[in-house]
Image (spheres, rainbow, N blue to C red):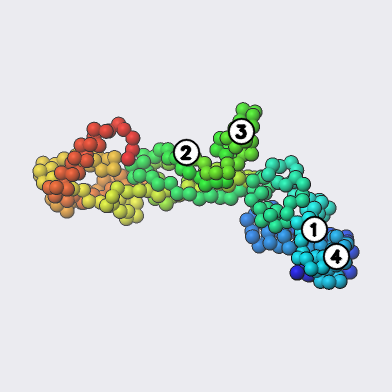
Amino acid sequence: MTDPYEVLGVPRDASADDVKAAYRRLAMRYHPDRNPGSKEAEERFKEISEAYATLRDPEARARFDRYGTSAPAGAAPDFSSVDWRTVFQEADIPIDWGSRQGAPHTGNAVFDALFGMMTGLFRNAGLLPGETREIVVRVPLELARRGGQRRVQVPGPSVCPSCDGQRVVDGQPCPECGGSGVRRGRSEVDVTVPPRVRDGSKLRLRGMGGPGNPPGDLLVRVAVTLPAGAHLEGDDVHADVHVLPGEAARGTTLRYAGADVTVPAGTHDGTELRLRGLGVGRGDLVLTVRTDFWRGLARAAGDWMSRLTDGGTEA
Ligand SMILES: [Zn+2]
């Protein structure tokens, strides 16, 4: 067992008031509220709290002074029976148990469980800022170009999207989350993808991330998905398109990722067509025309199908 005097930095003969003052000072420094997300601060807070719990209890303190452990003979130190609520209150450590949902009400929670869950509890109870969550949304090239809505899944626990974590809808407890403002499981959120979005850009959805006070943000990283065989060079999309020899000779208009592409008459195999602004972001679409009967035929058939279903939804 660690030496509680050392942990709190007080001499062996420190008075109860000195012990309390030392604990208070350290607790304020390592309070989870002031160190959101810091495992180290959480560990320190736990350590000083255990040390204080030992020294504030005259019996446990006497046992430690005599045997070097606060535990009764033969037992391991046990903090599960400590009334943490009283301990914190006594030392004026501001932990708002009662008025928030999710936090223990008795203060008799088992210490390890309490501290293991502390950060999570505090976040869910609105005592700590929520975590920033990051997820990926796959956006087909066509949608990336014109923008639009895309539904994404947010892993739980997350801010309840029905009440935006406000716990109430029309003056009633939110039916989705039972009034907790938190969705335990994953939830679905519609993301508005702006037109001309670039691959890898991040969209920030305020308050849709991890629960807490304030709720964390949701960062949605855009991954633009390209048609098979295409690749990105910067923001330019490069790909081969196949045309029938007759199409190359006479010229044709083909469809590529939702865009009409004019192949001029007399185009040769290997000709590069650059379509300004039809790539990703402000990039171009760079198509290399390949003259090939069978592949050209397959492409033409695909175009024909897509024209039939035109007016339908994006790929
Ligand atoms: Zn809700």
What amino acid does circle 1 point to?
A: Arg
* C-alpha gap between disc 2 and disc 4: 57 Å
The 10 Å Cα crowd at callout 4, few under 14, some 14 to 19, many 20 or more, is many
What amino acid does circle 2 point to?
A: Asp
Circle 3 SS class = loop
* C-alpha gap between disc 2 and disc 1: 46 Å
Instruction: Determine which residue is flagged by label 2.
Output: 190
Instruction: Determine which residue is flagged by label 4.
Output: 61
Whether residue 93 sits left or right of residue 216 in the image: it is right
Instruction: Determine which residue is flagged by label 1.
Output: 24
The outermost residue toward the top is: 170
* Disc on the earlier residue, 2 or 1: 1
The numbered disc on residue 174 is 3
* C-alpha gap between disc 3 and disc 2: 19 Å
Ligand 1 neighbours mark 4 (CB distance < 8 Å): no
* Disc on the earlier residue, 3 or 2: 3
* C-alpha gap between disc 4 and disc 3: 48 Å
Residue 281 locus on image (x, y percent)? 37, 47
* C-alpha gap between disc 3 and disc 1: 38 Å
The 10 Å Cα crowd at callout 1, few under 14, some 14 to 19, many 20 or more, is many
* Disc on the earlier residue, 3 or 1: 1
The 10 Å Cα crowd at callout 2, few under 14, some 14 to 19, many 20 or more, is few
* Disc on the earlier residue, 4 or 1: 1
Do tag 2 and tag 4 residues touch (Cβ < 8 Å)? no
Do tag 4 and tag 3 residues touch (Cβ < 8 Å)? no
Circle 4 SS class = helix
Circle 2 SS class = strand
Residue 125 locus on image (x, y percent)? 67, 45
Q: Is the C terminus in the top left, top right, bottom left or bottom right quadrant? A: top left
The 10 Å Cα crowd at callout 3, few under 14, some 14 to 19, many 20 or more, is many
